Amino acid sequence: MFDLLRLPGIKPVDLRTGNNRITIVAEAVDDNVPACDGCGKPMYRHGKRKNIFADTPMEMQPVRLEVERPRYRCDVCKCMVVPELGFLDERRRATKRLVDAVRERCLGTTFHDMADHTGLSVNSVKNIALDMIAELDRTVCYETPVILGIDEVNLAGDMRCVLTNLATNNVFNMLPQRTQDHLKPFFKDMRDRERVEWVCTDMWRPFKRSFAQYLPNAKLVIDKFHVLKAASEALETERKIFQSQLTKNERIHVKKSIRWITLKRPKNLSLEEQEALLEVRRSLPAIAHAYDLKEMFYRIYDDPDAESAKHAFEAWENALPDQGLEDFKKLAKTVRNHYDDIFMYWNSPVRITNAYTECLNGLTKIANRMGRGYSYDIIRAKVLYAKYARKVGSGVRVASISGIQQTVEYGPHIPTLVESAEAGEMD
């Protein structure tokens, strides 16, 4: 029979098809009678043992190997042995080449699809993936960012911490919790932590408390999009207050007509929307006033330097009325509470934002949805070790870390992850 397997130590003797799989029957090549490890005496043949192993698919179908091997027994020690075949992964009941193929693809597809393709159980695919992830955690090392992005994402039932390299737009790490108890040890032990010059986060104070004492050269920049988001939310509050006073039909009309117009910047309005905004000014002056305050706040970030931006904020703050617009007043208080860190935006060498970190958060949620309930560890690995994205925009160097030579790279390229997700290729 033609050798379909090309595996050392066995020869195929039969082939069967059925049940959407190919079964290849093979026999071990029985050349030498082994000696007993205990007493050194020659052993004798004592029957045969048939085992079934999964192998790499053929013709788009899973393959099973029925391998028949002789058993040997020692007449003195009474021990029994079955010759090992080097190409088998006995623990996985599969060939090593199949295990390698699963390792190669399991983070780029779902475990169910991988199981359907190979004939392995979902749990077997998952266990192979978990072993590989543990190995990647030990061996893969990403360059410590000069500009570090920190954000949180609700993933697999808990709030996780996401870290990015904002200078290169790469993934840096993902941590299981965002609490100080988890973050402080991470920053304390972070390799080359003195490299970090800038950190961009939202206004959640535990982030700053976690890294402040461990990143000696880092200055904090509050992400501008989180600040601007508060202004849009204040406008939304005013719209909802007005809308609550209307009938049901009027509320539907107001929501459709006003919400998206007032959330847009003036430069992004179509001619029709500009006319609609004029009508809002004529008939709904309170909403128009809230819209103008939102826009006035947004224009702070159009200023060229920190001093002019601070003056613009003070002018905006002074424009707030004594009564009403409570959410805008809360925004003013928030800016005062984070004053230096917000206006550090204008002192950084480039305009630093967490935009790509937010993109990454969206991608992790996509991986969560498409993975049919993956655990946090699996989702983290799918993002953190995505091979196709690690090959793009990533400088690589060899460094000695704790006396061990390791390849250091920048991590998966976030724009590449985004492109793959948009193309439906991020499973």
Image (cartoon, rainbow, N blue to C red):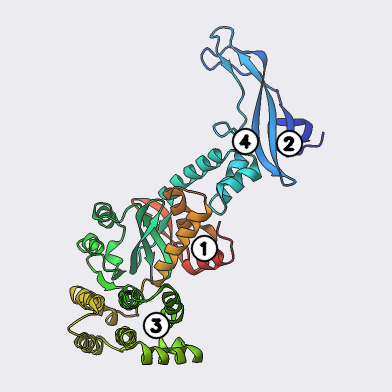
Which-is-in-front pick, marks 1 and 3?
3
User: In the rendered structure, are the residues bearing label 2 and label 3 in contact, judged by CB atoms less than 8 Å apart?
Assistant: no
For the view shown, which residue lies furthest in the top direction? 76
Of pointers 4 and 3, the one earlier in the residue sequence: 4
Q: Residue under label 4, please give it.
A: 87
Task: Please provide percent x and percent y for residue 314.
Answer: 20, 87
| Residue drawn where x is 53% and y is 39% of the image | 123
Q: Name the residue nearer the viewer: 278 or 247.
A: 247
Label 1 element class: helix
Which residue matches tag 2? 19
Q: Is residue 153 visible?
A: yes
- Kindly identify the residue that appears in the image at 55 percent across and 61 percent down: 388
Residues at marks 4 and 2 touching, judged by CB atoms closer than 8 Å = no
Decide which of tag 2 and tag 3 comes sooner along the chain.
2
Name the residue carrying label 1. Answer: 389
- Measured as percent of width and height from the top left, residue 70 is found at 67, 19
C-alpha distance separating marks 1 and 4: 31 Å
